[in-house]
Image (tube, grey):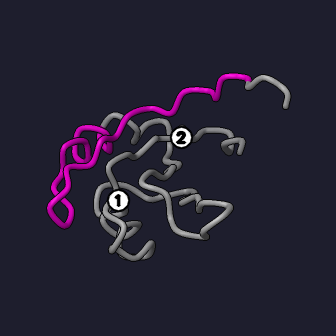
Amino acid sequence: MATTPGTKRLFVGNVPFRIEADELRSIFEEVAPVADFFWPTDRETGRKKGFLFVDVAEEDMAAVIEAMNGKDVMGRQLAVNEAQPREARPAR
């Protein structure tokens, strides 16, 4: 999951499971254009996970975090911050 040059990846936690992806994406797009939107699913159940990733232009990142972090969506407060690289996992 590499970002496009000029964009930053945001981690969005505490996402309500009953919202549709296009509806949630449009909430983010009210603040700034979204370059990419990825909502992972559980491999075993196929259910959406409680977090997702949103890519926005570098110059929009601070505004998106400011507007969306703590925003109430369907009774849940989103947790939005810059995504950090995934730590290496031990081999199985």
* View extreme (right): residue: 91
Q: Amino acid at mark 1?
A: Phe
Q: Residue at x 43, y 76 (%)?
A: 22
Q: In the rendered structure, find residue 84 and report the number of the disc placed on it.
A: none
Q: Quadrant of the C terminus?
A: top right
Residue 87 among magenta residues: yes
C-beta proximity under 8 Å, tags 2 and 1:
no
Q: In the rendered structure, find residue 9 and report the number of the disc placed on it.
A: 2
Instruction: Name above or below for residue 90 compared with residue 51.
Output: above
x and y, in percent, of residue 67 in the image: 22, 46
**For this rendering, which residue is in front, 67 or 77?**
77
**For this rendering, which residue is in front, 63 or 46?**
46
x and y, in percent, of residue 81 in the image: 38, 34
Q: Secondary structure at mark 2?
A: strand
Total number of numbered labels? 2
Mark earlier in primary sequence (2, 1)? 2
Instruction: Name above or below for residue 48 compared with residue 52.
Output: below
The magenta-colored residue range is: 63-88
Q: How many neighbours does mark 2 have within 10 angstroms: few (below 14), some (14-19), or many (20 or more)?
A: many
Q: Residue at x 45, y 41 (%)?
A: 11
Q: CA distance from mark 2 to mark 1?
A: 13 Å
Q: Which residue is mark 1?
A: 28
Instruction: Name above or below for residue 43 compared with residue 62.
Output: below
**For this rendering, which residue is in front, 31 or 92?**
92
Q: Residue at x 37, y 63 (%)?
A: 29
